[in-house]
Image: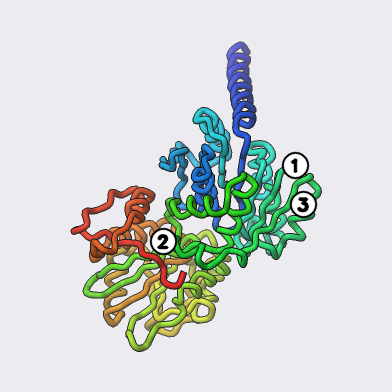
């Protein structure tokens, strides 16, 4: 009994200590921004942090994204080390560390998917002064669905009490507005159409107007002028899932690889696919468009959505399915795609995949990675980032940043790292 009482006392002491530190962190950090949404959470978190830094606000940010990262006040990054599976406890640890770094603002990407845990993340941990919902898409319907309206209501779990919520998707302003009013929270809706084309041009990767509009609404609340905020956004290191373009040569084939892995719901993927002009191949050049679909065996609904979209919303000359796909999903792909234009490749190396692509292309290929970045998606992206063939003139400051995010060292210029270049027409 004595040992049990001692252990109980130790647990209680630890709990009290953590509770006290958490309250101290909340009091010490006046601006707390909680970023939620279906897509773009990591990108928006990074952009907000960069914009606030440019505005002279000492900011710490944490992204979950493709790889969890802590972004320090000087803009440098370090990995979030986890001894086990991800859990909400790490958000409290990060908040306390931000307090020790004397942060004036904390920008936190919501890491919860289940609606009840999203509520815990907001109302028991973040207590945000500014909440953000980037957009609302038909994703995670098995947890937040079955309808998109259900997803909107679920994401509204992070609407703060007595603060401000910035919504990047005006289609659901009425629903989110009702939740906001019930919590004494002001609703601000971002307008993508207000972002000028010239404001998007300096981004060295495909960024979305709705993300920039959402960030500008947040930075205005923080007293940062739009021109200063934009200048900071241009300096932001993109997430590993950012839509970058690498151009390189492989097996005598000129290749252009688009990273669209992070847009892992159908609506987002189709929008980016069309924006990049991947739904057509210029006959005069003879180049081929190839879609690499990285699927997850445990996401049957999403995999079926991708299977039903090929040859309709997502059109390419060839499709390569990697990752994991149950028999039903494979059958659906085979029903959609004519013979000879579809390959299932499980366990194959990234180099072998690009060897195949080079063989079926006429010296030029536009390749896009879609579906999910996990597992073999990282291998495909790493191969493109390190591929030979980029000239020194094509190398900018961005490849080094991408290599840092990937956890690899940039190769010397004569070794030819793949160089992300601005996407045409942005």
Q: According to the image, label 2 marks what residue?
A: 204
Q: According to the image, label 1 marks what residue?
A: 162
Foreground label between 2 and 3: 2
- Mark 3 Cα-neighbour bin, 10 Å: few <14, some 14–19, many ≥20: many
- Residue 248: x, y in percent? 28, 68
Q: Secondary structure at mark 3?
A: helix
Tell me: 72 left or right of 268. Answer: left
Tell me: 44 left or right of 422. Answer: right
Sequence-wise, the earlier of marks 3 and 1 is 1
Label pair 3/1, CB-CB below 8 angstroms:
no
Q: Identify the image quadrant of residue 18.
A: top right
- Residue 98: x, y in percent? 53, 33
* Coloring basis for residues: rainbow
- Mark 2 Cα-neighbour bin, 10 Å: few <14, some 14–19, many ≥20: many
Q: Is residue 147 visible?
A: no
Sequence-wise, the earlier of marks 2 and 3 is 3
- Residue 54: x, y in percent? 49, 45
Foreground label between 3 and 1: 1
Q: Identify the image quadrant of residue 79.
A: top left
Give me the residue at 30% from left, 78% from top. Answer: 364
- Mark 1 Cα-neighbour bin, 10 Å: few <14, some 14–19, many ≥20: some
Q: Nearer the viewer, residue 288 or 323?
A: 288
Foreground label between 1 and 2: 2
Q: Secondary structure at mark 1?
A: loop
Q: According to the image, label 3 marks what residue?
A: 179
Vertical placement of residue 288 versus 35, above or below: below
Tell me: 341 left or right of 22. Answer: left
- Residue 313: x, y in percent? 53, 78
Q: Is residue 53 visible?
A: yes
């Amino acid at each position: 009994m004595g040992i049990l009482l001692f252990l109980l006392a130790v647990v209680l002491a630890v709990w009290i200590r953590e509770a006290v530190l958490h309250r101290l962190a909340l009091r010490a950090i006046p601006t707390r921004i909680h970023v939620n949404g279906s897509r773009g959470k990591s990108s928006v978190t990074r952009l907000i942090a960069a914009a606030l830094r440019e505005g002279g606000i000492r900011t710490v940010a944490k992204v979950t994204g493709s790889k969890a990262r802590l972004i320090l006040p000087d803009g440098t990054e370090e990995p979030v080390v986890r001894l086990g599976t991800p859990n909400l406890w790490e958000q409290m640890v990060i908040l306390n560390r931000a307090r020790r770094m004397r942060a004036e603002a904390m920008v936190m990407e919501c890491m919860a998917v289940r609606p009840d845990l999203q509520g815990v993340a907001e109302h028991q941990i973040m207590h945000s002064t500014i909440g953000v919902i980037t957009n609302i898409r038909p994703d995670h319907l098995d947890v937040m669905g079955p309808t998109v309206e259900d997803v909107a209501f679920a994401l509204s779990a992070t609407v703060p009490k007595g603060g401000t919520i910035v919504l990047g998707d005006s289609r659901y302003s009425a629903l989110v507005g009702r939740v906001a009013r019930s919590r004494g929270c002001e609703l601000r809706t971002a307008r993508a159409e207000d972002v000028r084309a010239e404001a998007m041009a300096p981004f060295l990767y495909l960024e979305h107007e709705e993300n920039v509009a959402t960030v500008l609404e947040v930075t205005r609340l923080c007293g940062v002028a739009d021109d200063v905020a934009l200048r900071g956004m241009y300096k932001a290191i993109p997430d590993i899932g950012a839509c970058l373009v690498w151009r390189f040569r492989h097996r005598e084939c000129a290749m252009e690889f688009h990273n669209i892995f992070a847009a892992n719901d159908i609506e987002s993927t189709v929008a980016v696919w069309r924006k990049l002009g991947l739904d057509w191949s210029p006959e005069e050049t003879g180049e081929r468009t190839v879609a690499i679909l990285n699927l997850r065996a445990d996401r049957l609904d999403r995999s079926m959505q991708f299977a039903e979209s090929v040859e309709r919303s997502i059109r390419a000359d060839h499709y390569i399915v990697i990752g994991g796909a149950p028999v039903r999903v494979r059958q659906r792909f085979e029903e959609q795609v004519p013979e000879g234009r579809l390959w299932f490749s499980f366990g194959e190396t990234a180099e072998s995949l690009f060897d195949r692509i080079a063989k079926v292309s006429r010296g030029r290929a536009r390749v896009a990675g879609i579906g999910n970045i996990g597992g073999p998606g990282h291998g495909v992206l790493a191969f493109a980032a390190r591929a030979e063939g980029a000239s020194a003139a094509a190398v900018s400051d961005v490849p080094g940043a991408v290599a840092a995010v990937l956890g690899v060292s940039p190769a010397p210029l004569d070794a030819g790292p793949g160089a992300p270049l601005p996407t045409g027409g942005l």
